[in-house]
Image (spheres, grey):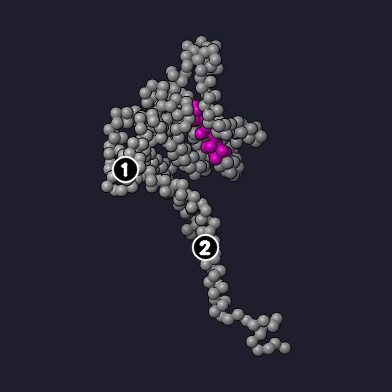
Amino acid sequence: MKKKGQTGEGELPLPISSKAKNRTFSRLQGRLAPYAFLAPALIVVTLFFFIPLVMVFILSFTNLDMTNFGILEWWRPANWSLDNYVKIFTNRFFPKILGNTLIYVALTLAFFNVGMALVIALITTHINRQAGFAFRALWLLPRITPVVVYIMMWKALSGPAPMGIINNFLGVLGIGRGEYLLNTHPWVFVILVNGFIGASFGMILFSSAIEAIPKDYTTASKVDGATTWQTIRYVILPMIKWPLLFVTTYQTLSLLTSFEQIMLLTDGGPRLYQTEVWALTAYHRALTSYFGNTQWGYGSAWAVALVVIGIIMAIIYLRVFKFGELVEEPKIDRL
């Protein structure tokens, strides 16, 4: 027989206030749990991305360099000005550097990072699966090869005859004069070197996206008499707009900020500013004695201007690919 105020197990029931506190604590714990998991990533991003980003932005308005380091109070607004940005746009080599950057990004993106990547993905997804996998694995070799080894290989390939392999091949065809090809055709090698690395990234994403398309769509197009090109144009490409937008935007921003391959291959040469791109100029100004004393403020201004260019390019891509329509709720869900 139960006694008054006791449960069947002989335990006293919890007061109503204790139950309410437990429920409140459980809800609070559930809400804070995601932030606890995200906290390490947020701390790392804050320390190694947002704080340096703010510092670079502030530095871009100062004339801090090695000669006044420890003397100039660069964090004070009284020492800020727009002189660095004026110097950028009045630099007589500014048009040359901007043109080099646009040529480098446009050609590498069109022929390799998006163009070649899409071609490889289309081919390897329409042949034997194992053969396609092996071919895609070969294209990953430039990406996983250490950069220094990779660039040394290209320098050896472009070397003068009789050591350079490319020159020997051109000699057999009766063209070329056996000269050092990096001096005569530097842009060809800059685009090839970066293109073979960049094509692998888009190739992986495009291959996954194409293989995810239901076979019924391509089968139906063939039944209706569509050619291979028509199937690609009207079925496959519209179905992979998201990967196309992502790869194009990401690779554009990546090319705008990449310079290590160019630095190791030509260092902006062989002639004055011949292959100098924007990111390499920012590096040369801020972190080397290429132009004299390391100019941290001036180099930061080049970097900030590059960020602005990247944002403009990203907005253009969102417009071209009609980002609003891609994220629009399906009309059938509105019914």
Q: Which mark is residue 72?
A: 1
Q: Amino acid at mark 2?
A: Leu
Q: Is residue 88 above or below residue 80?
A: above
* Crowdedness near tag 2: few (<14), some (14–19) or many (≥20) residues, C-alpha within 10 Å: few
From the viewer's perspective, is 173 left or right of 263?
right
Left or right, 16 with respect to 270, comes to right
Relative to 11, is 97 above or below?
above
- Which residue is labeled 2 in the image? 32
Q: Nearer the viewer, mark 2 or mark 1?
A: 1
Determine the CA span between mark 2 and mark 1.
43 Å
Say whether residue 120 is visible.
no
- Helix or strand or loop: what does disc 1 sit on? loop
Residue at 49 percent of width and 40 percent of height: 247
Q: Amino acid at mark 1?
A: Leu
Along the line of sight, the residue nearer the viewer: 300 or 109 = 300
Q: How many marks?
A: 2
Residue range of the region highlighted in magenta in the rendering: 191-207
Where's residue 222, x and y in %?
A: 58, 37
